Amino acid sequence: MIISYNMNRRLFLKMGVATFLASYAEKLFSHSVATQPVSATGFTPVTCENVPAGPDDLKIRFLGTGAAGWKPGSKGRRMSSVLVDNKFFIDFTLSVEDMLPKDVHPTEIFYTHSHGDHFQPQRALLQGIKKVYLSETWKDKAELIFRKAAEETSKDMPEIIPLKIGQSVEIHDIRVTPLPANHATSNIDEQALIYLLEKGSDVNHLGVRLLYATDTGGLMGKASRLAGIDSHLKPGRPITAFVMEATMGIHHDEDFRIFNHSSALTVSRIVNMLTETGRYLPPAGQPAYLTHMSNSLHDRLSQDELNAVLPIPLRAAYDGLDVVFHPYKP
């Protein structure tokens, strides 16, 4: 009888302790969930869109803001490319000619990589391209493709200029620095690029320092170091403007494209870290822009719906949008 009493007593104590711990854990979990900070959404006011550009500003026109999967010429987003200061292109794709100002005829283009939603040599030649800048890792391939395109279009063969990582090019009044992207193509030896664009930036002035990052899964350490924003080192020269791809939208962070592309949440975390550490200094009213957005992976939201759910300071670019990035002023 005594043995039975002791066993029941021990069992009762165990059950009591277990019930108490479970109840406490539930309250603790509920409290932690309830008090988690929620990121504010919907950047406003925006003061840099579709406004006149001054001589010290850097103007970007988004010719397309979609990822592969959008149908060329269809309603919605075209393939991602930009016109820089009405002077040169970064990528040039299908069905974007109507996005160009009528009196603008660039003759230079910088390519990020050789995928067809960024690289259309025939269209480039028909637009009058004379100089082509791209990674040295696929220069030979590009020459063969452009030579064939030149024959098919009866246009002159353009000059193909190979770029080395970190080696800047001065074009017009803009310094363009190629940086490594985390993105693979069918040519395993090809190094995809993202670009740092600097205008009015010297030892005495920060000017405009725009990091244009598409296509890439996050930012590679070498790229951030060359751009001056490596979080492992003391802050170098901050960037003042940021455009980054977000192939995946909110709630799609674990899509298989994560090895080659970024999500909106990835961009948000990068921007927050750079801001908190003084590595990103945008003027007031200037968001960080998303481009290269997948139709299905942004839940087919409209432009307004998408901007409403994006965490501050993110904002979705759209085809034909002009953004004027002003120089940094302390």
Image (cartoon, rainbow, N blue to C red):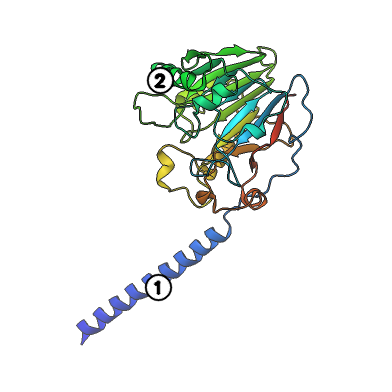
Decide: few, some or many residues near mark 2? Use Cα within 10 Å; few <14, some 14-19, many ≥20: some
Q: Which residue lies at the image location 56% right of the left edge and 15% below the top edge?
A: 130
Question: Residue 82 location, x and y as percent?
Answer: 61, 30
Q: Secondary structure at mark 2?
A: helix
Q: Give the image quarter of residue 7.
A: bottom left
Quarter in which the N terminus is drawn: bottom left
Q: Which residue lies at the image location 57% right of the left edge and 61% below the top edge?
A: 34
Can you see residue 266? yes
Q: Nearer the viewer, residue 120 or 231?
A: 120
Question: Residue 115 location, x and y as percent?
Answer: 44, 31
Residue at the spot of label 2: 138
Mark pair 2, 1: CA separation? 65 Å
Question: Residue 326 location, x and y as percent?
Answer: 73, 26
**In this view, 16 is above or below 184:** below
The amino acid type of the residue labelled 1 equals Thr
Quarter in which the C terminus is drawn: top right
Residue at the spot of label 1: 19
Relative side of 96 to 2, left or right = right
**In this view, 151 is above or below 63:** above
The amino acid type of the residue labelled 2 equals Trp
From the viewer's perspective, is the residue at label 2 or at label 1 nearer? 2
